[in-house]
Amino acid sequence: MQSFFDPNAPKKATNLSINSDLLVKSRSMHINLSATLEQALTQELAKREAERWRNEHKAAIKAYNEFVNEHGGFGDEFRNF
């Protein structure tokens, strides 16, 4: 997976506010809060970057799809399915 941040950057302490029951239950199950948050933020960054990319290239994607609909795709004559 492509990294949207420097995974080797130093850690930085921060304060967060979360649901107290969620915190108690997470700690009781020995969930590493920092690692879990980093994983969730990595997934959210990837999702938003993909959405940004789609929006940025929307016109080109539309033009390509229209071209394929009108002229067919590259190599269509070689397909067996």
Image: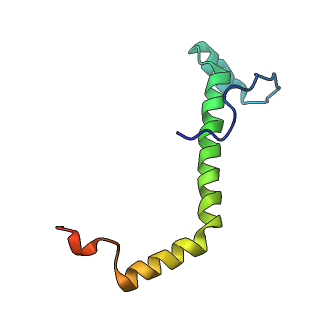
- Place of residue 2 in the rendered image (x, y in percent of width and height, measured from the top left): 56, 41
Residue 33 sits in quarter = top right
Q: Residue furthest left?
A: 80
The residue positioned 82% from the left and 25% from the top of the image is: 14
- Place of residue 44 in the rendered image (x, y in percent of width and height, measured from the top left): 63, 44
- Place of residue 55 in the rendered image (x, y in percent of width and height, measured from the top left): 63, 65
- Place of residue 24 in the rendered image (x, y in percent of width and height, measured from the top left): 66, 18
Residue 80 sits in quarter = bottom left
Q: Nearer the viewer, residue 48 or 7?
A: 7
Residue 67 sits in quarter = bottom left
Q: Residue furthest bottom?
A: 70
Looking at the image, is 8 positioned above or below residue 50?
Answer: above
The scheme the figure's colours follow is rainbow
Rendered-image quadrant of the C terminus: bottom left
The residue positioned 81% from the left and 21% from the top of the image is: 13
Looking at the image, is 72 positioned above or below residue 58?
Answer: below
Looking at the image, is 76 positioned above or below residue 17?
Answer: below
Q: Nearer the viewer, residue 14 or 19?
A: 14
The residue positioned 66% from the left and 37% from the top of the image is: 41
Q: Could you tell me how many numbered marks the image carries?
A: 0
Q: Is residue 47 left or right of residue 13?
A: left
The residue positioned 21% from the left and 68% from the top of the image is: 79
Q: Is residue 76 left or right of residue 6?
A: left
